[in-house]
């Protein structure tokens, strides 16, 4: 019996953000933007959705008077990501 | 290619995850500048000391003061690297504290060996007066081994945890030289010290710096 894939994660940009954040302790918004080649506006919307789902934490700081946004995956985010990958593997293995 | 808010097939999802994890891994490159600097500084200090002994001259200052002077650029490099770091890897903090701890140990070792020498010197002088010749025990013969012992630890741990073979082998070389230096005269000890710093830090630092430049270039090309 296949489990439904998490709709929050089953989207190209949000999955890319989560895959980046699972590999590191924390990352600046500009780093994620650089790696995903997404526009700032689109990325902001997707980051907000992940934050609302409780999958990531977003901290706003200042560096040299410039705003700095730092994103970090949460425990719930790690769990959801792991489940998502397990479900994906079962789809690909049995599909 | 710009990533969108669109659903994916299962295969595309797995490919994307792999691609992003690799991208994140590539971003965690050390510049290698600190390793290059310390490798060069220690090698220069050891070789200058060797030339002082071999050619029988003395500089007006102790060449090892250069290591204290190198702390200033090290602080600058650390601050700059921290500011430029857009991403923090899980091992970053561990590595930072490992090397800070190593630096503290080195300065404590200098203090401890200096104190030991001050305690030993009157005894050695007394021995000379009584026996008419110097003791066969030369305190400074053991200095290089003690420092090589310390050099090996953070180098080896960094090599293992970063899966960076040049540092892994460099750390092991420090420990081999540590044992060897026990049985060799001071001149050879200094050569071993210079060799260890070159193979443990200078060469790995150059490799790291090359990798860092390569990753930066690839990123710049990808963003065009």
Image (cartoon, grey):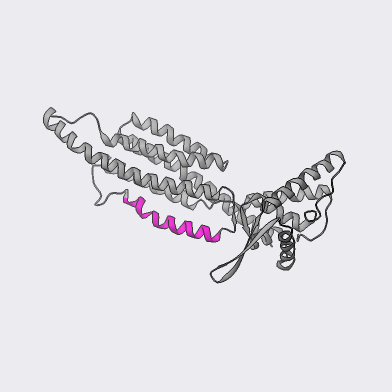
Point out residue B6 in the picture as x, y percentages from the top left corner.
Answer: 82, 59
Q: Which residues are magenta?
A: B65-84
B202 part of magenta stretch:
no
Compared to residue B110, the image places residue B1 above or below, namely below
Q: Is residue B7 left or right of residue B195?
A: right
At horizontal 35% and vertical 45% (from top left) the residue drawn is B108
B70 part of magenta stretch:
yes
Placement of the N terminus of chain B among the 4 image quadrants:
bottom right
Please say whether residue A14 is visible from this viewpoint: yes
Name the foreground residue: B44 vs B130. B130
Point out residue B58 in the picture as x, y percentages from the top left corner.
Answer: 24, 47
Q: Quadrant of residue B195?
A: top left
Name the foreground residue: A69 vs A58. A58
Point out residue A69 in the picture as x, y percentages from the top left corner.
Answer: 63, 64
At horizontal 34% and vertical 36% (from top left) the residue drawn is B189
Placement of the C terminus of chain B among the 4 image quadrants:
bottom right
At horizontal 30% and vertical 35% (from top left) the residue drawn is B186
Point out residue B104 in the picture as x, y percentages from the top left corner.
Answer: 39, 47
Compared to residue B115, the image places residue B83 above or below, namely below
Name the foreground residue: B194 vs B97. B97
């Amino acid at each position: 019996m296949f489990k439904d894939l998490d709709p929050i994660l089953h989207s190209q940009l949000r999955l890319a953000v989560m895959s980046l954040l699972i590999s590191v302790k924390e990352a600046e918004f500009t780093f994620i933007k650089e790696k995903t080649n997404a526009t700032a506006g689109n990325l902001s919307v997707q980051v907000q959705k992940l934050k609302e789902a409780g999958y990531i934490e977003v901290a706003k700081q200042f560096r040299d008077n410039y705003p700095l946004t730092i994103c970090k995956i949460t425990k719930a985010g790690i769990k959801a990501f792991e489940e998502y990958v397990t479900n994906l593997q079962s789809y690909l293995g049995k599909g | 290619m710009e990533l969108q808010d669109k659903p994916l097939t299962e295969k595309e999802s797995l490919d994307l995850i792999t691609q992003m994890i690799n991208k994140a891994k590539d971003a965690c490159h050390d510049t290698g500048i600190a390793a290059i600097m310390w490798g060069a500084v220690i090698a220069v200090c050891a070789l200058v000391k060797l030339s002082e002994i071999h050619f029988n001259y003395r500089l007006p200052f102790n060449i090892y003061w250069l290591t204290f002077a190198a702390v200033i650029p090290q602080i600058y490099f650390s601050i700059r690297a921290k500011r430029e770091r857009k991403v923090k890897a899980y091992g970053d903090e561990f590595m930072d504290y490992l090397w800070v701890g190593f630096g503290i140990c080195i300065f404590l070792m200098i203090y401890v060996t200096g104190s030991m020498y001050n305690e030993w010197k009157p005894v050695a002088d007394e021995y000379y007066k009584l026996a008419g010749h110097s003791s066969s025990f030369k305190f400074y013969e053991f200095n290089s081994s003690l420092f090589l012992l310390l050099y090996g630890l953070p180098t080896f741990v960094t090599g293992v945890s970063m899966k960076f073979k040049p540092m892994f082998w460099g750390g092991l070389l420090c420990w081999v030289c540590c044992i060897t230096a026990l049985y060799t005269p001071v001149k050879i000890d200094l050569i071993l010290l210079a060799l260890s710093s070159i193979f443990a830090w200078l060469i790995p630092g150059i490799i790291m710096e090359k990798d860092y430049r390569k990753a930066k270039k690839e990123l710049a090309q990808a963003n065009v």
